Image (spheres, rainbow, N blue to C red):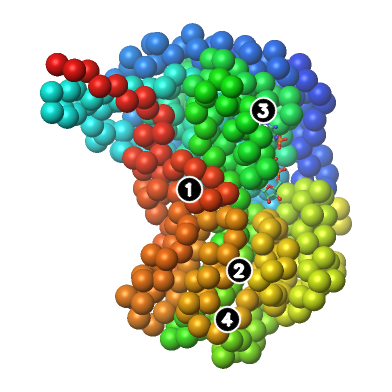
Amino acid sequence: MQQVQATYVDATWAVGGGAELEVGSAADGRVLARFRGADAQDVDRACAAADRAWDAWAATSVGERAGLLRATADLVAKRADELGAVASLEVGTPARMASTVHGHLVAATIRDVATTLESYAFEERVGTSLVLKEPIGVAAAITAWNYPLYQLATKLVPALAAGCTAVLKPSEIAPLTTVAFFEALAEAGLPAGVANLVVGTGAEAGEALVTDPRVGIVSFTGSTRTGARIAELAAPGITRTTLELGGKSASVVLDDADLGQAVSASLRGCLINNGQTCAALTRLVVPRSRLAEVERLLVDAVAQLVTGDPRDEATDVGPVASAAQRERVLGHIEDALAQGAVLVAGGPGPVDGAPAGGHYVRPTVLRVEPHLRIAREEVFGPVLCVIAVDSTEEAVAVANDTDYGLSGAVWSGDPDRALAVARRLRTGQVAVNGGAFNISAPFGGYKRSGYGREGGRFGLEEYFETKAVQL
Ligand code: NDP
């Protein structure tokens, strides 16, 4: 078991002044690490350090910042297997994908930020004015437990690239890969105070960070409820916020789609990271005329999935991150069945052969009516809702009939038809016929999935003030 030091402030690790906390293993429930969390005083020290470091950091050259970020990316790539193994335990990510999503994807994203920075035009002439982009100041980043390092690479990293200094608060449920990342930042030679870490609870460390007057922007990933609380806390100080919140994304299968491809890719897009993904494709909207065929494909596909220990290379679906999350997911399934959802595959029972004490949920497919709670709320577990519709018009209406607007997919034998439907979806991203995730493209939500964008130049620009100098 690891003893963690919860704060990294001014390039010094220290024990926090807050409550005793534990990090549990999603795989078997044992305690992986213990630490005293950061309290409001730790957050105050971290913000003071970031504030002191800002002038000098903002004055560094683009080349210097890009070089430090590339050195950090190399260290992350070198430690990808170790980071993946830790994330398998604290998040539940299956080993087969863990070093990719929690290691190599993170390194690639950091390099992409460095490349974007190197080609960014910080100044432009607009008529008689010189328009300048300047770093906002101290950036606060608050991340969730599902992809801690990828979120850090799309928040803290562009903030540093822009010339901001930063304070990061990860989720106390899965902070261990973030601690390893800060070791990499230190090894890469980041100056003291430029990036600071406070591992603590949302209520204590999180709220202190959002309300600190030295913070100029808060970038948050997590639930819509907490996002609303953060916007409320930030409002009196007119502190900017960017919110990357939940989703209930639809995969819309049109009547001329290759059903085999659409169904298997949509199921994968739902179950990725055991369903703990904000952009997961959790609603499968299909033509009623093809419903029976779709359900047969889903039953076969789910029967072939290996659910169990995330450390096992054969595992397709691992546990969810915490006992509380497992209870939440099972509660959603039971409530849906009580409300009339039809069980197509899986269900609320135990996962045979999975390690005792872990937080396992059987991958579950339900046929539902669009008004059911499970078809409207974010479940954040391995649960797919199938919804049958009678026309393309109805498919678009059902896909858009949600408070969320993060992601989506469209499948059709005719790419133009698919693109026409993609244009009508009220979401920040849409994949047409399996179009691949692109780290340089803007990522973010419509509606209650939040505002602001991450990725590429769109993510970098969140951390700038814009000044017009009249000449
Ligand atoms: P939260 O939104 O509560 O947590 C996300 C982050 O915010 C964590 O670092 C958390 O800290 C922090 N936080 C919590 N409350 C505050 C606050 N008042 N002020 C500042 N920071 C705060 O998510 P949960 O972990 O509670 O998960 C609940 C549900 O949210 C999930 O079931 C899922 O539906 C959704 N979710 C969505 C995510 C996404 O990517 N869109 C990611 C995670 C969750 P800490 O955890 O340490 O308390």
Instruction: Answer with mark 1 or mark 3, whichever residue precedes in sequence.
Output: 3
Above/below status of 297 relative to 463: below
**How far apart are the alpha carbons under marks 4 and 2?**
12 Å
Kind of residue at disc 2: Arg
Residue 237 appears left or right of 94: left
Mark 4 and mark 3 residues within 8 Å of each other at the beta carbon: no
Q: Is residue 354 above or below residue 163?
A: below
Whole-Å distance between the Cαs marked 2 and 1?
19 Å
Q: Crowding at label 3, few (<14), some or many (≥20) Cα neighbours within 10 Å?
A: many
Residue carrying label 4 = 389
In the picture of the structure, the residue carrying the numbered disc 1 is 444
Kind of residue at badge 3: Gly
What is the x, y in percent for residue 366? Answer: 71, 74
Whether residue 26 appears in this view of the structure is no
Residue 368 is situated, as x and y percent measured from the top left of the image, at 70, 75
Q: In which quarter of the image is the C terminus?
A: top left
Q: Residue 283 carries which label?
A: 2
Q: Residue at x 50, y 63 (%)?
A: 408
Q: How far apart are marks 1 and 3 (CA)?
A: 21 Å
Q: Does label 2 or label 1 sit earlier along the sequence?
A: 2
**Label 2: which secondary element:** strand
Which image quadrant shows ligand 1? Answer: top right
* Label 4 residue SS: strand
